[in-house]
Image (cartoon, rainbow, N blue to C red):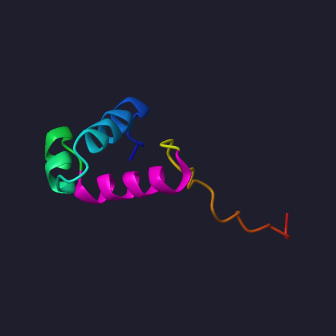
Amino acid sequence: MKAYSNDLRLRIIRAYKEYPYQYYTEIANRFYVSPAFVSELISLYQKTGDITPNSKRNRFPKPINIKG
């Protein structure tokens, strides 16, 4: 699954900043994303100030083939 665009991420953060006391489910329903994504995005933004997706590809290197 592809990561959500930075434009969508920015719109979600703007909606949160505009009304910080609304539920994450309300924001999620407005942008057709999951409440968990909204929660993770907001916590990432609050911790780092950044909204770019984390690269989780190739977390574990492939094993070395010794036999050749």
- Judged left or right of residue 60, residue 10 is left
Which residue is pictured at 17% across the width and 56% down the height?
23
Which residue is pictured at 39% across the width and 51% down the height?
41
Say if 18 sits above or below 46 in the image.
above
Foreground of the two, 18 or 62:
18
In percent of width and height, residue 7 lies at 38, 29
- Judged left or right of residue 12, residue 50 is right
Q: Quadrant of residue 2?
A: top left
How would you classify the magenta stretch by its main secondary structure? helix
Residue range of the region highlighted in magenta in the rendering: 34-49
Foreground of the two, 55 or 62:
55
In percent of width and height, residue 51 lies at 47, 43
Residue at the top extreme?
7
Foreground of the two, 35 or 14:
14
Is 33 included in the stretch rendered in magenta? no
Which residue is pictured at 70% across the width and 63% down the height?
62
Which residue is pictured at 31% across the width and 33% down the height?
11
In percent of width and height, residue 33 lies at 23, 47
Report how many numbered discs are placed on residues in the image: 0
Foreground of the two, 23 or 5:
23
